[in-house]
């Protein structure tokens, strides 16, 4: 079977790419091994800059109707220090971000892809890439009944997340040596948690992130080193221990834990290039940053939009080769390279409790810098712009 574009993975990156490309009149087929709605390990807080992207994708009404929370503040706790980061309201996007369970959000986005005209095949795994003289020309598939098949396409888009078979088949991913594990569970409260903020609790063994999502659901997840799990292999024991270490978290866990604790590898990864002849990568398959700054869904939607612009232009000229797709790599470097540097810098701070304590103290004194931090982590100010204005240097000075 021959298609214009096959998208491997129907998460936020794949769905956003599909919506833009189907709207451009291209023949798009999305393959996902899961059947939606499905769960996905995530802190479930979208940076404020994701809101205009969701509007553009035509899914905001559905997200509001699903009861998504709007969070306008991130509070960071480090030992005895507390820092309230409020999103600024003068950056062209609302000063709040949505919080919604991925089960609901991803199903809404994939419905958006169907409505835009893409064909969506759920329950279809992609095993491998098909090559012809070094060029990707399609994928091999496996249905839930085990039936095998293949689809040829002029372009294969890898949107399969951290373990995307397209990225694996091309050997493009580079994983950080600092192995990190996330331990996640939802909790229910007895009433509707009216809070409009999420919290980050930074400690010696890692950090805990907590956010209310729709209804009475709370998302409470911990990030620890892989070594912590090797010392104590039961994820629930490590999770409970992390929660006990931050007394201020007690108000999040007064109700019931709604499910077993799930452990997920969240080691950062990047790629040297996100394009090759016949294929390109979007979302986590090309770049996964530590979720402390909570920007993965924004990056997934933004990379889908960037990729779709380049791909639609290439199809309109009839030349869909590596040279045409390389424009996407240039745009990614422009938009995402500084974000990656910032994430590494913030990791360097939160992995050293003495330093995070000092930086929090410095940011409490320098509200302007704190607002810049909120704007950059909320993607309301481009990281490269802030970096050029000396944001990294000022953050380092805040610790003195
Ligand atoms: C613990 C954790 C906490 C996070 N917290 C946040 C947060 O609070 N805010 C935020 O913005 N980001 C957060 N992120 C990051 C965010 O989850 C990702 O950046 C986002 O999901 C990326 O979207 P994606 O579409 O690239 O990949 P995914 O959402 O992973 O979607 C990939 C899709 O591909 C499908 N797939 C995979 N393999 C195959 C295959 N072989 N064949 C067919 N289909 C396949 C999967 O079923 C899936 O539906 C967090 C991530 C983790 C792990």
Image: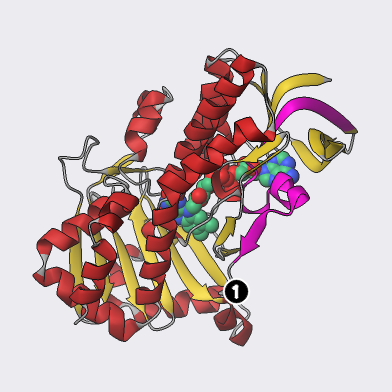
Rendering quarter of residue 292: bottom left
Residue 274 lies, with reference to residue 341, above or below; the image says above
Q: How many marks?
A: 1
Is residue 101 among the parts visible in the rendering?
Answer: no
Residue 33 in percent (x, y) is at 72, 39
Residue 68 in percent (x, y) is at 35, 38
Rendering quarter of residue 110: top right
Q: Residues within 10 Å of mark 1 (few under 14, many from 20)?
A: few
**Where is mark 1, residue-wise?**
177
Does any atom of ligand 1 lie closer than 8 Å to the CB of label 1? no
Outermost residue to the front:
323
Residue 336 lies, with reference to residue 354, above or below; the image says above
Q: Nearer the viewer, residue 75 or 145?
A: 75
Q: Residue at x 61, y 45 (%)?
A: 274
Q: Which residues are magenta?
A: 149-175
Rendering quarter of residue 229: bottom right
Residue 120 in percent (x, y) is at 66, 25
Q: Is residue 385 left or right of residue 144?
A: left
Residue 16 in percent (x, y) is at 51, 31
């Amino acid at each position: 079977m021959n298609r214009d574009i096959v998208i491997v993975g129907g998460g936020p990156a794949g769905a956003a790419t599909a919506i833009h490309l189907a709207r451009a009149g291209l023949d798009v087929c999305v393959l996902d091994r899961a059947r939606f709605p499905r769960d996905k390990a995530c802190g479930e807080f979208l940076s404020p800059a994701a809101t205009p992207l969701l509007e553009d994708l035509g899914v905001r009404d559905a997200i509001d109707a699903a009861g998504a929370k709007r969070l306008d503040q991130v509070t960071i706790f480090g030992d005895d220090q507390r820092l309230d980061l409020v999103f600024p309201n003068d950056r062209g996007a609302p000063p709040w971000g949505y919080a919604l369970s991925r089960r609901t959000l991803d199903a809404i986005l994939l419905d958006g892809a169907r409505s835009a005209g893409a064909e969506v095949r759920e329950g279809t795994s992609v095993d491998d890439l098909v090559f012809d003289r070094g060029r990707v020309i399609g994928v091999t598939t496996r249905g839930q009944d085990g039936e095998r098949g293949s689809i040829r396409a002029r372009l294969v888009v890898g949107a399969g997340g951290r373990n995307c078979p397209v990225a694996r088949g091309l050997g493009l991913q580079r994983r950080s040596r600092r192995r990190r594990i996330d331990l996640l569970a939802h909790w229910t409260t007895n009433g509707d948690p009216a809070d409009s903020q999420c919290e980050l609790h930074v400690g010696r063994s890692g950090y805990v992130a907590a956010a209310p999502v729709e209804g009475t659901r709370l998302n409470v997840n911990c990030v620890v080193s892989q070594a912590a799990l090797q010392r104590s292999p039961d994820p629930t024991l490590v999770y409970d221990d992390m929660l006990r270490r931050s007394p201020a978290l007690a108000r999040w866990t007064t109700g019931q834990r709604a499910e077993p604790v799930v452990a997920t590898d969240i080691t950062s990864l990047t790629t040297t290039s996100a394009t090759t002849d016949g294929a390109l990568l979007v979302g986590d398959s090309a770049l996964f940053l530590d979720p402390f700054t909570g920007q993965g869904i924004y990056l997934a939607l933004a990379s889908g939009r960037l990729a779709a612009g380049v791909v639609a232009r290439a199809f309109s000229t009839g030349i869909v080769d590596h040279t045409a797709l390389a424009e996407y790599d240039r745009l990614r470097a422009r938009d995402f390279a500084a974000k990656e540097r910032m994430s590494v810098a913030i990791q360097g701070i939160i992995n050293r409790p003495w330093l995070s304590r000092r930086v929090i103290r410095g940011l409490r004194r320098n509200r302007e810098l704190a607002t810049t931090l909120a704007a950059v982590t909320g993607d309301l100010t481009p990281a490269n712009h802030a970096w050029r204005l000396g944001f990294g240097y000022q953050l380092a000075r805040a610790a003195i």
